Amino acid sequence: QVQLVESGGGLVQAGGSLRLSCAAPGIIASIAVMGWFRQAPGKERELVATITSRGNTNYADSVKGRFTISRDNAKNTVYLQMSNLKPEDTAVYYCNADLRRIPSWGRDYWGQGTQVTVSS
């Protein structure tokens, strides 16, 4: 059973910062495209940021310049540093490990989600 364990969510005022962490099993953390998604009430889940095993990153336009995704392969952990948070960033944030393009895996995995609430 593959588990992605998220932490770091909470309540913060607008303009503040939070750092989310996602711990993954070693082999997955080293070969998967790791990502963060979020889902606000009444909305669909959306991509926030991804990072490949080589460190290439991709961000949603709404978070560019404010959020930074990174990975520490030694700790099998992916981070999402969120700065200058806005009320519209309020959502449940999910960690994702995408192994769909690797034939021996062919699927992706999700964490349980962590709540981020930004007050105005």
Image (cartoon, rainbow, N blue to C red):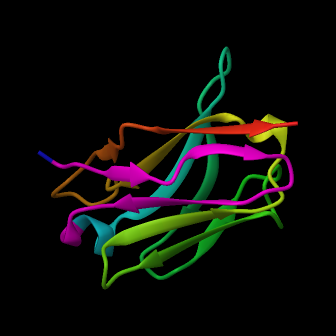
Specify whether 79 is left or right of 66.
left
* Residue sitting at x 58%, y 44%: 10
Where residue 1 sits, quadrant-wise, is top left
Q: Is residue 98 above or below residue 54?
A: above
Which x, y percent locates residue 15? 86, 55
Specify whether 46 is left or right of 9.
right
For the magenta stretch, what is the residue range?
Answer: 2-27
Which x, y percent locates residue 26? 21, 71
Q: Count how many numbered circles sit on residues in the image.
A: 0
* Residue sitting at x 54%, y 51%: 36
* Residue sitting at x 20%, y 53%: 105
| Of 76 and 83, the residue lying toward us | 83
Specify whether 5 is left or right of 115.
left
Q: Is residue 78 above or below residue 3?
A: below
Magenta span contains residue 17: yes
| Of 77 and 106, the residue lying toward us | 77
* Residue sitting at x 32%, y 51%: 5
Which x, y percent locates residue 16? 79, 57
Magenta span contains residue 46: no
